[in-house]
Amino acid sequence: MSQSVPPLRARIGLACYNCSKEGKISKCTGCRRVGYCSPECQKTNWKQHKPICKVLGVLETDIRAPHALVRPLPEEPIRDPEVLQSEIKEQAFWMIRFCEYQLCRDVTLEERNLIMWEPRCMACTRTDAIMRVEVASAAEFPWFQKQGPTPERLTPCKRCGLSFCCSPAHWDIARALHEAPGAGNNGLSQCDINCGIRTDTKVAEVLVSAVGDEFHWLPERTREEWTSLAEGTTSWEAELAQDMERTDEVPMGRARDPWARAASESLTMPMTILYALEQFNEGDAGTRKEKLIVHVLGADAKELMKGVVFEEILHRLPQVKDLEILFCGPELPVQRTPSSVQMKTCPDCTAQGRKRVHVVACNTYHGYIQTQGSQFIPPDLCIAFNSGAYEEWTDEWCATIKVLVERKIPSVFTAFSREEVHSDAHLLQRMGATLHPMLGPTKNPWGSMKLTPEPRNVYGFFADNAWFAGGFR
């Protein structure tokens, strides 16, 4: 990620947008979307916030501006989540178009998040801004008239604080879905998961404050032999419980849950690679190589900063002596030629003469192959983590996918959410890929356990590598 994205509660105005501190928060008087804990924090963040603040401020001061963006919303609650999602997508689309027109440029990642994560009623999709528009516009635009008193703002769930409704009547309808056990989330409800997300956020903030970094945990052990990661043979809960029992870095009991979720946020990358290698190779054929080459496509600073976790591949593949990871992406630091660095390994790997080499190439993957020419060595696996290929850098991704298909390189693409996965899978197939039945489109058993509420929706969650969009060779 090229820009800093504030934590979830800061993005939805429940924590300071500059320092993420919770407590007494004063809303920005210009846009009324973000809040600050002090005038000093607001001043520090002003240069970055100013452009989008002025644009959003237009919607707060000129009641004629929103009429093309905000249609009359129904008084009766909407009970179908698919209808709610469709309504939100259309609202977000026009809001982003409006902001880009006013800014005379594309919105940045942080500006897009501010728009997409605006809190919404779970029964009618209203936001605080829409409710203010309805009140201010009632006299001038008769079609904005509502029946009964108009609430001033959304009310959060008293337990989790991350889901909202515009009135008690709408809460009565939304509560059934909000508190119902989720079949795909270990039986947890949306409210339960939201409470876990708040805990995860607080743990992350404490760590960043104490050590200046997120929690990147690597089990301090090496396996004597390969053990299958196929779905049904083991799980995150089993693997992390076993490994965390051997360390005093994390607390015991249920207090361990946020630490386990944080650990999976990093470990999902090597575990997904190992799972994909197992699916592409019969039996343990993919685990017995002396040298293993993995290419990470569309890589950015996130993968580089968490690079130490790729040693888990060595820890689980005892026969591999030489692991080479290529990080290839146009957003990486500019390098005239690919740079190769031998990374420090754990004492056990070092004693056994095992090596982990990282290569960084600032290029698209098809561009990298072209520059390598006859020196290009096909990898054992190419992987694109959360590529979003169908909506970002699509032309470049299409060129890369075409090369991968033509050269028959084992490749896998992951996605954040169910919404993304089918679009990415369709793109892969359109470019000639025949998808492996176990690698997409389907859930990834080794996707991160650390969930985040879906932007542009009032139900659902996403996570790093949560889905396989497709694997092919």
Image (cartoon, helix red, strand yellow):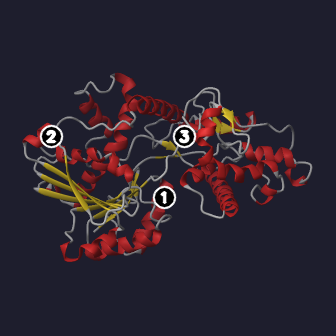
Going from the N terminus, do you reach mark 2 or mark 1 first? 2
Relative image position of residue 1 (x, y in whole percent): 45, 52
Classed neighbour count for the residue bearing mark 2: other residues with Cα under 10 Å, few (<14), some (14–19), many (≥20): few
Q: Quadrant of the C terminus?
A: bottom left
Relative image position of residue 447 (x, y in whole percent): 37, 47
The amino acid type, in three-letter code, at marker 2 is: Arg
Going from the N terminus, do you reach mark 3 or mark 1 first? 3
Classed neighbour count for the residue bearing mark 3: other residues with Cα under 10 Å, few (<14), some (14–19), many (≥20): many
| Figure check: 93 above or below 430 | above
The amino acid type, in three-letter code, at marker 1 is: Glu
Real-space CA distance between mark 2 and mark 1, rounded to the nearest whole angstrom: 35 Å
Give the mark toward the camera: 3 or 2: 3
Location of residue 108 (image quadrant): bottom right
The amino acid type, in three-letter code, at marker 3 is: Leu
Q: Give the left or right position of residue 239, taking residue 195 as reference.
A: left
Q: Which residue is mark 2?
A: 223
| Figure check: 259 above or below 300 | above
> What residue do we see at 52% from left, 31% from top?
195
Q: Which residue is mark 3?
A: 8
Give the mark toward the camera: 3 or 1: 3
Residue 420 tag number: 1
Relative image position of residue 174 (x, y in whole percent): 65, 39
